[in-house]
Image (tube, grey):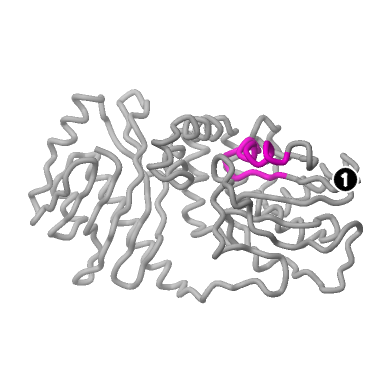
Amino acid sequence: MKAPLLLLAALGTDTRIWDGVAARLAGGTALLRIEHPGHGGAPTEDARSVAQLAARVLRTLDDAGIASAHVAGVSLGAAVALALAADHPGRVRSLTLAHTALRFGDPALWDRRIETARRDGLAPLVEGTLARWLTPGEATADPGRADGLRAMFIATDREAYARCCEAVRDFDGEALPARRADAGPAAGPPARAAAAPARRPPGPAGRTRRRRRCAAGPHRRRRPPVDDDLNAATHAACMDVLDRFMAALNAHDAAGMDATMHFPHVRLADGPLRVYECAGSNPMDLFERLRDADGWSHSRWGERRLVQFDANKAHVALDYTRYRGDGSVIGVYASLYTLTCEGGRWGIRMRSSFGP
């Protein structure tokens, strides 16, 4: 019997993201789709690690009487596929790993995402997530695709999403057991890593980062060493500035906002580029207009992530949500802030946002 192709999806999606690939393989390859817990209508389970998710996939293969399979995964699905191949090499004939990594960024980012999901649900996270999956041009050119991914994300069970975030946060691909050269498979040839299909399927399954392609085995490329002390200090300083900025914003405290900035201060939103030359020039009528037009009450940070930094400058990718007084959401806006340390003080030097 020909081994099937097992498809695993990304965090916050389901295996419909593989529909384009499935259509091209129709009639030639048997496909098996396994959803993550709480995704795509699957029941919620207490799986909080990639190892537990891989063990769940293995049980499904056992229950179906499948000795081995070709495995393709995106993001979290790729991490699960990698763990499955490392722990049970005889069950995996080949690997296709797309849009994944040996580690998935700063654990503090995932802690905030987990907290938001459990407290507020997935609505505050959806726009920031879509901004990572689709470029603005892609979302505009194919709004149906964006709407489908948005609905897929929102339909995910919030607790299952939070538990899968815990799995992503704690995943360390470099700690997986290396494939032994003499590890004979139970059925089929040894697992091999392959690039994702050249033609991109709908959704995040289409984004294959070839420079970060992962392979099970002793020849994996390792990340350069990171100065953990500098990372922690810069992260703490930037988060403190952003927390104070948001508190002042919600209090309509212009002087408090100025105290978190460096001047000249640059802001690029959906209008022309603005440069505020000195403290006191940051206009507060914007928030009066928002309150009058949309009933704006307050804003809250969603995801905040250091993407590049050194001892004196940091780029922070983030999103924020604007709320009405009744708690309903006005919008979620992806942004990039540049913070600098000048005269021993961290402050916001530049803000670029897709919000008004």
Residue at 64%, 43% (x, y): give it: 9
Where are the magenta residues, as a range? 7-25
Q: Is residue 15 magenta?
A: yes
In the image, 209 versus 101, the foreground residue is 209
In the image, 90 versus 155, the foreground residue is 90
Q: Amino acid at mark 1?
A: Ile
Q: Secondary structure at mark 1?
A: loop
Looking at the rendering, in which quadrant would you find the C terminus? top left
Q: Residue 334, image x and y in percent?
A: 36, 44
Residue at 11%, 52% (x, y): give it: 276
Q: Residue 241, image x and y in percent?
A: 28, 56
Residue 352's place in the image compared with 156, above or below, is: below
Does 41 sit left or right of 313 as displayed? right
Residue at 82%, 42% (x, y): give it: 60
Q: Residue 114, image x and y in percent?
A: 52, 45
Q: Quadrant of residue 178?
A: bottom right
Does 271 sit left or right of 211 as displayed? left
Residue 130's place in the image compared with 340, above or below, is: above
According to the picture, the residue beneath numbered tag 1 turns out to be 66
Residue at 61%, 72% (x, y): give it: 221
